């Protein structure tokens, strides 16, 4: 079955202020390249041909980034004048994903793993009677994450959303593969704003899991964003830089991050 992708990129990145006062979180550089570009080129490498990006914060900057010729025919985007929430965005654009598998990604997180293995697990190896696959990862800060409890088949039985002393450190990576039945459920719910809070509880017992043992990082704080600069990055095609890329290379955000990194080393 064909896969369409949703890249959620509307957040304001409040924990990264003052960096995000002038530049959106999803375009923060990771080793010199904007985070959202990694996601788009990764999906292109996976031969996913229809990608939808939602925007809200810093809409003009986002528009300039997404209107680039290199994304023509691959990426569509929708502007939300009012922030709809992760579930609200899916519901509002449900026709884009109808009768498809939906790859649902919080694109302001940094992730490096074997996505082909993730997709293969969902398509060919997930337990019977499950209708979505959640990517998970082991976190060093479980109280700041959504922690999951699994049965012997790796199916989610319980959620613990950012609680003190959760029972374990296996966290929800907020990257999902959804079968069309999940979209049917989304449409049937009375209230859909936050996908994790409003939709996932209705799917307990039907959520398979696949663990990312490589890199998954919330870059929502300065320290985490600085740590990401030392991570290995996917081998993607960055040949033939366009005008936007050349302008980005001279963006002051690189200097600010470099200065911050030097200061953090001296503390």
Image (cartoon, helix red, strand yellow):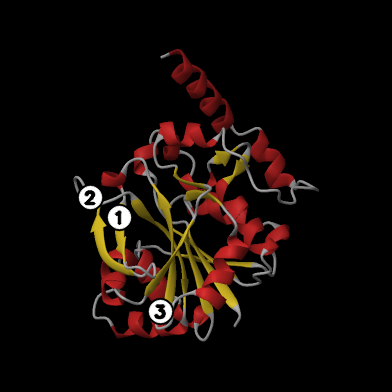
Q: Where is residue 36 in the image (x, y as percent from the top left)?
A: 56, 52
State if disc 2 and disc 1 touch (CB < 8 Å).
yes
- Crowding near the residue tagged with mark 3, few <14, some 14–19, many ≥20 C-alpha atoms within 10 Å: some
**Lower sequence index among marks 1 and 3:** 3
Quadrant of the image for the C terminus? top left
- Residue at figure coordinates x 31%, y 76% from the top left: 205
Q: Is mark 1 in CB contact (under 8 Å) with mark 3?
A: no
The residue identified by callout 3 is: 130
Identity of the residue furthest to the top in this view: 266
Outermost residue on the front side: it is 152
Q: Measured from the top left, where is residue 80 in percent x and y?
A: 42, 64
Marks 1/2: CA–CA distance? 7 Å
Relative height, residue 6 to residue 20 (above, below): below
User: Going by the image, does 18 lie left or right of 99?
Assistant: left
Q: Quadrant of the N terminus?
A: bottom right
| SS state under label 2 | loop
Q: Disc number at residue 166?
A: 2
Left or right of 183: which side holds 149? Answer: left
Q: Mark 1 Cα within 10 Å, few/some/many (few <14, many 20+)?
A: many
Horizontally, is 4 left or right of 95 in the view? right
Cα–Cα span, label 1 and label 3: 19 Å
**Residue wearing tag 1:** 147
* Residue at 53% from the left image edge and 41% from the top image edge: 28
Marked residue nearer the N-terminal end (1 or 2): 1
Instruction: Tell me the residue at 34%/83% (across/down).
Output: 185
């Amino acid at each position: 079955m064909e896969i369409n992708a949703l890249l959620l990129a509307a957040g304001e990145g409040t924990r990264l202020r003052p960096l995000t006062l002038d530049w959106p979180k999803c375009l923060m550089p990771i080793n010199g390249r904007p985070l959202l570009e990694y996601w788009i080129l990764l999906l292109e490498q996976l031969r996913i041909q229809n990608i939808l990006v939602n925007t809200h914060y810093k809409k003009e900057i986002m528009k300039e980034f997404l209107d680039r010729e290199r994304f023509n025919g691959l990426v569509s985007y929708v502007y939300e004048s009012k922030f709809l929430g992760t579930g609200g965005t899916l519901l509002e654009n449900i026709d884009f994903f109808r009768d498809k598998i939906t790859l649902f990604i919080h694109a302001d997180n940094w992730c490096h793993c074997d996505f082909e293995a993730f997709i293969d697990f969902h398509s060919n190896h997930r337990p019977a009677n499950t209708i979505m696959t959640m990517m998970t990862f082991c976190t060093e800060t479980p109280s700041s994450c959504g922690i999951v409890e699994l049965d012997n088949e790796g199916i989610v039985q319980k959620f613990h959303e950012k609680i003190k002393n959760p029972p374990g450190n296996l966290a929800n990576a907020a990257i999902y593969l959804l079968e069309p039945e999940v979209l049917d459920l989304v449409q049937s719910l009375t209230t859909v704003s936050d996908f994790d809070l409003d939709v996932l509880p209705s799917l307990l017992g039907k959520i398979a899991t696949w663990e990312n043992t490589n890199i998954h990082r919330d870059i929502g704080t300065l320290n985490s964003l600085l740590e990401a600069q030392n991570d290995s990055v996917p081998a993607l095609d960055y040949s033939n830089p366009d005008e936007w890329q050349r302008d980005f290379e001279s963006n002051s955000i690189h200097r600010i991050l470099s200065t911050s990194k030097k200061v953090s080393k001296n503390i």
